[in-house]
Amino acid sequence: MKNKYLLPLLFTLGISQSHAESTWIMPTIESCKANGGEIKKDNLCQAKWEDAMKICKVSNATLPSIDRLKNLVTSCGATNVTGSTKDWKSVAGKNNKNTKYHTCHKKNGFVAYNYWSSSLPTNNEGFAFEINFEYGYQTSTRKNTSLLVKCVQK
């Protein structure tokens, strides 16, 4: 009987059934727009970093740390890539062609694009870390850049 009411509530909160068992939260269209974000293709929320933080907060969640996002990359069968990764272009190219990896991150609600993390690089005040799920690539980006927003439950 409880499940009868749970799914409509999850959809109202912006959580799909496949995310109901995990901790990932998709911001609602309303919470995204009301807090400085924009709705892009496939009803995905895109925002600048400060707005992404607000969007997750009103969703009773937070932006995930870069470590949490990197863990998703590796648990899906890809290799984390940074500019300091030896032969990083080759590794990123292998991630891009890894169908198991792409199936897994899509199953977790992520598309092959860039997502904000809550993590900040040291000594670089205007930047925050992000991860690109097409290549499994992590970098720091200016906070005034609009990237996709995916939240994690507190």
Image: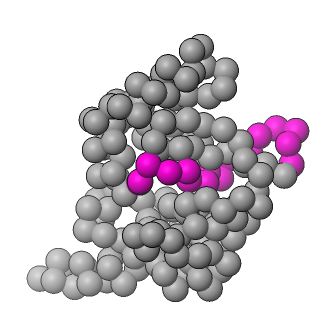
Between residue 30 and residue 94, name the one nearer to us: 94
Residue appearing at x 60%, y 37% in the figure: 138
Give percent across and percent down for residue 79. Answer: 45, 26
Give percent across and percent down for residue 55. Answer: 60, 73
Residues shaded magenta: 110-125
**Per the image, is 115 magenta?**
yes
Give percent across and percent down for residue 37. Answer: 62, 75
Answer with left or right where residue 153 lies relative to residue 5. Answer: right
The answer, for residue 57, to whether it is visible in the render is no
Q: Residue furthest top?
A: 86
Q: Which quarter of the figure has residue 122?
A: top right
Residue appearing at x 86%, y 49% in the figure: 125
Q: Which quarter of the figure has residue 12?
A: bottom left
The answer, for residue 133, to whether it is visible in the render is yes
Between residue 96 and residue 137, name the one nearer to us: 96
Answer with left or right where residue 39 lies relative to residue 25. Answer: right
Between residue 2 and residue 103, name the one nearer to us: 103
Image height of 74 relative to 63, above or below: above
Answer with left or right where residue 100 lies relative to residue 55. Answer: left
Residue appearing at x 61%, y 54% in the figure: 116
